[in-house]
Amino acid sequence: MKSIVADANVILRYLLADNDNFFEKSKNLFDKALNGEVDIFIKEIVIAEVVYVLERVYKVQREKISETLENLISLKGIKAENRDYLLKAFKIYKSKKLDFVDCVLCSMAEDYKIETFDKELNRCIDKND
């Protein structure tokens, strides 16, 4: 079975249901994944774009974004790049005022040495050491 790579627009239309035509198309795709007909692969950078758009454009609260995307990447048929780091990043994102990409970096600090000049990110990394 060939995996389908979903872009941010497909994910956003599915989550927001703000365009009937695109929502139906994205829903059909996610239904196929849930039914085991296809796998949907979601790149880490696409998740970051979705977070950015939900937070900055649609003014969705961080906790709601985290919960929604945690659930999405945990669905049957969804394969998320760096899933474990993303799940940790969502927990950090709920509780800290860091950009989501910094939350991903912070989530990686147990396995990698993160070099940064960002004071907030350094505090997050130091807390994880």
Image: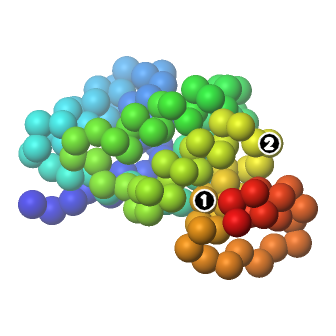
Residue 29 is left or right of residue 97, and the answer is left
- The quarter holding residue 41 reads bottom left
What residue sits 77% from the left and 78% below the top?
A: 115
For label 1, the residue is 107
For label 2, the residue is 97
What residue sits 20% from the left and 52% below the top?
A: 39
Residue 16 is left or right of residue 80, and the answer is right
- Residue 46 position, x and y percent, is 50, 54
Q: Amino acid at mark 2?
A: Lys
Question: How many numbered marks appear?
Answer: 2
- Residue 79 position, x and y percent, is 30, 54
What residue sits 61% from the left and 77% below the top?
A: 112
What residue sits 71% from the left and 37% below the top?
A: 95
Residue 121 is left or right of residue 104, and the answer is right
The correct choice, above or below, for 112 with respect to 108 in the image is below
Asked whether 96 or 36 is in front, the reply is: 96
